[in-house]
């Protein structure tokens, strides 16, 4: 999520500054690139509400237990879908369901070690249940993934705490004592205020739509759009949900993910928060789950190596992309409501590119750089100024929706070249 919400659009001050115009840009000295749609343990970045008769109740429907099998993960969160906060809360919700139903000493298998899986395992462990966490990757954290670039925490998954007040991730930050950087979306260069104002005239018609659950956002937009308007659509909708307007239900706006308060970047990284939730809970990495079979008195979880693990209950916290691709076989088949919910949710795409430069050539004083590419609207439409937040000459670029899918199959070198081409044209 990039936080470029429609709410932000409505309150944005007209405070764009012009960009500096250096004659030539330095080449990056290092980069980190994501491709979440190609990641077999994610198959997308986060869930979004596609047009369907289920509307926002789809989250609750997905979360419904199927006998001794429980569901958690951001896609099941009604409070804050598509966020770390929603993931953590969903894991705790599943744990509470189990604690209510379980006998003392029961064994629970938790599939996945993102914020939802670790949050769930933490509460189950605290309740003295016996917990096994199975993680397909060779690391914990899932879509929270902190790498280091030039000494700074380069988040390859989530970057922001959205709305710090009352946010359980802020509580973790407080408990771990890390720093926070309040990100100011109005501290921006390159924003096209006219195109955003034009877009708002179309989006304001959402209130008149009879059935926002089944109507896509594209119904509000003209069939022919200028490049500037298409870029504005990308900034406001596609960067937020990871989905193009024709795939996104208007009701998605009802699922406002941003709580009260500021959006924080974390200069010390999210990995510390994950480690804090995990504590000393063991996680078995490299354990790829392929099948979950349930009976009246328990579950059998099968791994890719053929091993079977038996438990009293199981919690599946895998991403919506993994569920949609049927990477795990459920036996017997999931109840119809769960299956309908999996079909009704989309798996959005937001990809990132971190670039480290020898020195800063962009506006040092803005938090964000926006770019309305006249030739390929939406491509590299948002950059975060790492110099402001982290004090180093790094930029973080984003592609979402269609441009992200276009880049997903390119080599690393091609992705960096594409980004540099955009940066050069932005600064020409
Ligand atoms: C690029 C990007 C930017 C984002 N930006 C933000 C942001 O700024 N703020 C914010 O709050 N949120 C953001 N999010 C969303 C946030 O990262 C997720 O909502 C959250 O981390 C999901 O946690 P989870 O526990 O539900 O799922 P995950 O973290 O995905 O955990 C699920 C785990 O299941 C494992 N798994 C999958 N399949 C199997 C299998 N077959 N067997 C065993 N294990 C399996 C996975 O490896 C993973 O570890 C962003 C996400 C992305 C990708």
Image: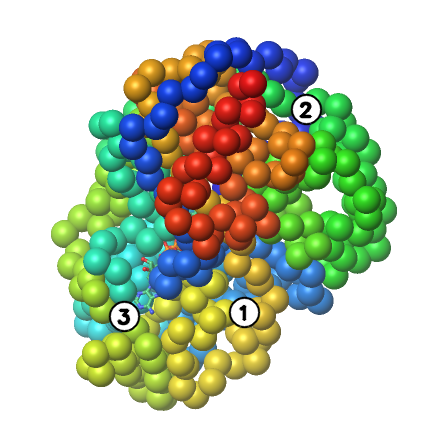
Does the image show residue 250? no
Q: Secondary structure at mark 3?
A: loop
Farthest residue toward the front? 24
Q: Quadrant of residue 124?
A: bottom left
Q: Is mark 3 within 8 Å of ligand 1?
A: yes
What residue sits right under mark 3 in the picture? 288
Which is nearer the eye, 192 or 297? 192
Relative to 428, residue 37 above or below: below
Kindly report the distance in space between the C-alpha atoms of the residues bearing marks 2 and 3.
Answer: 46 Å
Residue lying at 50% horizontally and 31% vertically, measured from the top left: 421
Kindly report the distance in space between the C-alpha atoms of the residues bearing marks 1 and 2.
Answer: 37 Å
Q: Earlier in the sequence, mark 1 or mark 3?
A: 3
Q: Secondary structure at mark 1?
A: helix
What residue sits right under mark 2 in the picture? 192
Residue 275 pos. (x, y %): 22, 45
Q: Secondary structure at mark 2?
A: loop
Is 343 left or right of 275, judged from the image as shown?
Answer: right
Residue lying at 27% horizontally and 80% vertically, measured from the top left: 302
Q: Do the numbered discs 1 and 3 sit on residues whose CB atoms are within 8 Å?
A: no
Relative to 143, residue 96 above or below: below
């Amino acid at each position: 999520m990039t936080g470029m919400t429609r709410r932000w659009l409505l309150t944005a001050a007209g405070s764009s500054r012009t960009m500096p115009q250096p004659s030539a840009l330095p080449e990056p000295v290092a980069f980190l690139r994501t491709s979440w749609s190609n990641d077999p343990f994610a198959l997308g970045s986060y869930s979004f509400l596609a047009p369907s008769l289920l509307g926002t109740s789809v989250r609750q429907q997905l979360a419904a237990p199927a006998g001794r099998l429980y569901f958690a993960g951001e896609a099941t969160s009604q409070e804050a879908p598509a966020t770390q906060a929603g993931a953590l809360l969903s894991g705790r919700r599943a744990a509470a369901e189990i604690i209510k139903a379980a006998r003392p000493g029961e064994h629970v298998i938790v599939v996945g070690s993102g914020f939802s899986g670790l949050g769930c395992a933490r509460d189950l462990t605290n309740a003295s249940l016996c917990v096994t966490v199975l993680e397909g990757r060779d690391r914990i954290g899932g879509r929270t993934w902190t790498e280091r670039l030039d000494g700074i925490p380069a988040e390859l998954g989530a970057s922001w705490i959205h709305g710090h007040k009352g946010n359980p991730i802020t509580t973790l930050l407080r408990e771990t004592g890390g720093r926070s950087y309040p990100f100011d979306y109005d501290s921006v260069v390159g924003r096209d205020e006219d195109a955003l104002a034009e877009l708002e005239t179309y989006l304001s018609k959402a209130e008149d739509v009879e059935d926002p659950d089944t109507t896509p956002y594209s119904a509000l937009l003209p069939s022919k759009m200028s490049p500037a308007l298409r870029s504005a659509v990308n900034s406001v909708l596609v960067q937020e949900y990871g989905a193009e307007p024709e795939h996104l239900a208007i009701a998605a706006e009802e699922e406002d993910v941003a709580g009260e308060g500021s959006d924080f970047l974390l200069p010390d990284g999210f990995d510390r928060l994950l480690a804090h939730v995990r504590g000393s809970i063991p996680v078995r990495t490299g354990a790829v789950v392929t099948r979950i079979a349930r009976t009246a008195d328990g579950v059998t979880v099968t791994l890719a190596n053929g091993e079977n693990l038996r438990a009293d209950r199981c919690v599946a916290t895998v991403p919506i992309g993994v569920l949609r691709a049927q990477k795990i076989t459920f036996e017997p088949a999931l109840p119809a409501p769960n299956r309908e919910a999996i079909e009704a949710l989309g798996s959005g795409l937001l990809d990132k590119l971190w670039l480290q430069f020898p020195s800063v050539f962009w506006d040092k004083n803005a938090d964000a750089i926006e770019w309305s590419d006249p030739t390929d609207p939406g491509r590299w439409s948002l950059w975060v100024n790492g110099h402001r937040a982290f004090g180093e000459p790094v930029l973080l670029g984003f592609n979402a929706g269609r441009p992200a899918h276009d880049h997903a199959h390119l080599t690393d070198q091609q992705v960096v070249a594409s980004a540099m081409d955009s940066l050069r044209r932005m600064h020409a």
